[in-house]
Image: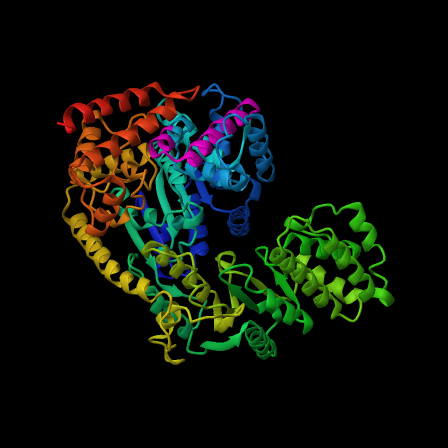
Amino acid sequence: MLNKEQLQASEIKDDRVLVLAGPGTGKTTTLVSRYKYLLDQGNKPEEIACCTFSRKAADEIKSRISKELNLDVKSLPVDTFHSLANTALKKMASKMSINVPKVYPQYERQNIITEIKNNNSKIFKDIKYEDQTPSKVLKYIDDIREKLVDPEDAAIEASEKGDEIQIAYADFYKLYEVYLTNNDLVDFARMIHFGYKAFAYDASNDKSYISQFKHILIDEYQDINFAQKSMIDELLKGGASLWVVGDDDQAIYGWRGSSVKFILEFEDNYDDVKKIVLNTNYRSENKIVIAANNLAKRFVERHEKNIISFGNDEGKVSVFKTYDEDTEASKVLDLIRLKADDKEFKDIAILARTNTLPKDVVKVLSSANIPMILKNNVNLFNDPHTKDLLRAVAIMGGIKSQKGWNKTISPKLLSFSKKLSEEDNWQKNLKSLSTFIINQLPSSLKDNELENKVGEIESCRLYLSEFENAVKAFEVLGTLFNEPEDQNGVHIGTIHGAKGLEWDTVIIMGCEDDKMPHSLTTSVLEIEEERRVAYVGITRPKTNLFLTWAENRDGIDKLPSPFLNEIMDYSPTAKKVTEDKVSRYASLMENWGEEAREHQKKIEKLKILRIHREKKRREEFIAEKQRRAELVAENRRAINSTIADGMGQGSGWKIKDTGNGFLLEVGYSAIKDGPSEKTRHDILSKVFNGGIDMPNTLKTEVAKTWGEPNSNERLRKMRNTINTALGAQKAKTNASQQAIEKWEKDLVYIDQVLRE
């Protein structure tokens, strides 16, 4: 039975609906009920586009709908964004005069990049390619595709910045696209790009395809990226309603292109939005909900929610300080044994911020014969040579390896493994195998690298040797490799991989100041996402939440995560976590407080503006905002309100590049359909005379590279920067004449106007 808010969300008749569903509030139940309601109102399944972010989520929704309505699962068009895009492309390919491409396997893409590099050595001869791996190139391609940037604009943008690596990446991007086109292939990121173009083409013509959809439902809207949103916006031009469900507090995929701003700004992006909040948590006991709410209060920008627990105070929230990783692993084992007395192992999960943290826990649990299910590539050891050892052991035990473990081992390695299963000589044979693998290590390794790899292999061998016979070792490896869904084992994985899951008891380990938030975190916005990661983790348990941290890890002194204080400040179940030393994040957190307050003031101003703004002005605002987002990448916003045609907020602190890319940071660009000649010259004038709105600290940084305002040094720097981009573009066989003409005009403006 649905509660009041769930029923309202399911049966609402508004055309633009945002459903905010906190942890355990019945998000999927409400989505399924909405789908059922639309069918009950006479809509056909093919008139409803339901989008999810994973095949697993789509299958779950299909299964629940089919059970309630006795419908064939195959007839339900519940798709991932990629499936929706692929279907649109197949429908529109002939009208767009293109061939229907075949989906290219993700794992083969690196081979294409390597082939492109080998066949175009002249293009890439001037860069240190050995430091620019195929995976880095592909990340660049995927990131820029998500912003719907074509190869030509990517090349111009790289030339403007004067970054030789990015120029090479842009060349890779163009050649990669050519390769896919010539072979009628499409990868996942390109599929969204093509889907957007298919919907946009239909929207600009007869709308014969998009008009068939009357309703669009989107699950986990907080995880949407720019390309996916743009694709949906084109689909909406067919006249469909839009109903989305998500939780901005659980937006944790910014690192892969998702942007929390789309759910935060939903009411700005669409007209007449109805917002419904699901506030009742049916998963967690009250003490866990209180702890989660304590953390959520620290978010700088969020949709207001008042999450309450449907349960009672039976739950437990506790923090445990341990000496090092070994004592932490022992503590985790004790907690599991305590809870396993009245719960099955599958009701317990161990989560960590990174997939390398649990390795000591895995060893301890294995030695104690605790069954485990390892997820998210959490392995005993990540070194490839150590994997060879485990792979050989697994193969000889008849175990089917999964994911990154399924490579065929060499004949020599296999021959050394053949006698491994003989119980009488188990330890001897295992030692011989590890010695063989150590002897295969590359001679080019440095002494410290060699020592580390030998240490990893030997540690793994000693761990396997602890079992009394090969059969027992094979059994343990079987649980690690096969991961059967119905296995009664402790779940071990990352917090990211646990999103959407739940257990009775959750242990979050490694709650230290360089793990949570991660040591690479340097900005307020990054802190926000790290806090959301922690929030997702602590909202997984039903009854028990245990948080552990080590004073010393890998021989280095540690301090507790600053998030522990935020979680426990108001909790009646545990004392406040204190620090006797200054955290490495102390200054960052202090600055964060000041920046957060300033950011919050801006948010409040925007809220007031939203209330009083007339409808026509809002539409103009949205249209201009979307236009600018399509012209440049999301992170290329102009910082000056004049430059942004009255729409910017002067957020100078967002400037990241005060070097060669500074002109891009302040809105200057020669990409097609980019800033007008007048706007470009206004920007150049402001850069020259120091009229860009930014904090004094940034002005100082700019002056170091560009010279003081109104100086000949700054004039030379501006001219040289544009001239470098111009020269790089002219040298290309496929040079953009449009960009060349713009840069040449701007050089004349610098010489004839600014120089005076």
Tell me: residue 267, above or below residue 302. Answer: above
Q: Main secondary structure of the magenta part?
A: helix
Q: Nearer the viewer, residue 97 or 643?
A: 643
Image spot of residue 597 (x, y percent): 22, 60
Image spot of residue 134 (x, y percent): 54, 38
Residue lying at 45% horizontally and 76% vertically, measured from the top left: 319
Residue lying at 69% horizontally and 63% vertically, measured from the top left: 460
Image spot of residue 343 (x, y percent): 59, 74
Residue 220 seen:
no
Residue lying at 66% horizontally and 71% vertically, measured from the top left: 370
The C terminus: image quadrant: top left
Image spot of residue 225 (x, y percent): 40, 43
What is the quadrant of residue 525 in the picture? bottom left
Residue lying at 32% horizontally and 21% vertically, measured from the top left: 740
Side of 667 relative to 249 (left or right): left
For the rendered model, the colour scheme is rainbow
Question: Bounds of the magenta span?
Answer: 156-184
The N terminus: image quadrant: bottom left
Residue 120 seen:
yes
Q: Nearer the viewer, residue 365 or 196?
A: 365
Side of 40 relative to 239 (left or right): right
Q: Is residue 440 magenta?
A: no
What is the quadrant of residue 16 in the picture? top left
Q: Nearer the viewer, residue 477 or 287?
A: 477
